[in-house]
Amino acid sequence: MVVNPAYPRSSAPTRASRDQRFKHAYQASQTRVREVRLFGVGLGAAILFSLLPLLEPWVQQAETATAVLLGLAIFQAGYVGWMMLLPDHATAWGVAAIFFAIGLGYGCLGVALILGSAGEEASGLGEFIKFLSPKERPMLAQWCFIQTLVMGTSGFLLAQYAARWQVRENPPHLPSSD
């Protein structure tokens, strides 16, 4: 057994000595924590907005679409929760990247639905598109483009916030004029 010389065998580490070990660990300011939590609430609203199609009966018939929508919402909510638990500019960057990627996915789905309106073979969506009537396809494509805007805007605002946070905490080192 290796004995740490800082802690004699007879005494257990006290709370003060444990706090001393972590005094150099990063902790965000209370203002930053509050701002990140506000971002989390806004992103949570965007996630709930993405679940609105589940209220439509024709989407509920397509079990694959329901599973994908719920899976994406749970995935996004997990990352937003991670950002709220560990407020840092790096976690904000990660969540922004996730929102950008999901917004891109919604945009691609919208384009596929528009191309698929000419024929089912054109889009490659197969099973999902046969549940949609010709009247429902443009509505879902419009919703996908709205989701692209919502997710893209959310990701952009969060990325801007993360970039400013990163610059404030780690200012760039400019070469001296000497």
Image (tube, rainbow, N blue to C red):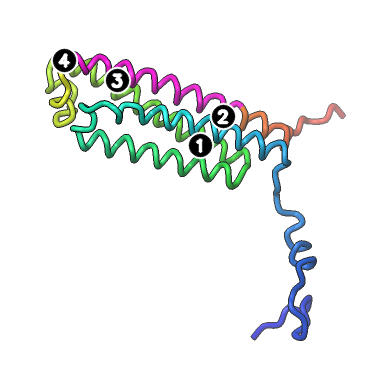
In the picture of the structure, the residue carrying the numbered disc 1 is 95
Image depth: mark 1 or mark 4 in front: 4
Q: Is residue 16 above or below residue 166?
A: below
Name the residue at 66% across, 40% down. 33
Disc 2 or 4, which lies upstream in sequence? 4
The answer to whether the residues at label 1 and label 3 have Cβ atoms under 8 Å apart is no
Disc 1 or 4, which lies upstream in sequence? 1
Is residue 155 part of the magenta span, yes or no? yes
The answer to whether the residues at label 1 and label 4 have Cβ atoms under 8 Å apart is no
Three-letter code, disc 2: Leu
Instruction: Name the spot of residue 80 as percent of width and height, x first.
Output: 51, 39
Which labelled disc corresponds to residue 110? 3
Name the residue at 27% across, 20% down. 140
Q: For the residues marked 2 and 3, what is the alpha-carbon distance in whole angstroms?
A: 24 Å
Q: Kindly report the secondary structure that dominates the magenta region of the rendered protein.
A: helix
Q: Count residues near mark 1 (Cα–Cα under 10 Å), then give few for <14, some for 14-19, many for 20+.
A: many
Disc 3 or 4, which lies upstream in sequence? 3
Q: Which residues are magenta?
A: 135-160
| Quarter where residue 51 is shown | top left
Dot 2 falls on a residue whose secondary structure is helix
Instruction: Name the spot of residue 146 as percent of width and height, x first.
Output: 39, 18
Image depth: mark 3 or mark 4 in front: 4
The answer to whether the residues at label 2 and label 1 have Cβ atoms under 8 Å apart is yes
Q: Is 109 left, or right, of 100 in this rendering?
A: left
In the picture of the structure, the residue carrying the numbered disc 2 is 158
Three-letter code, disc 1: Val
Q: Count residues near mark 2 (Cα–Cα under 10 Å), then give few for <14, some for 14-19, many for 20+.
A: many
Figure quadrant of the N terminus: bottom right
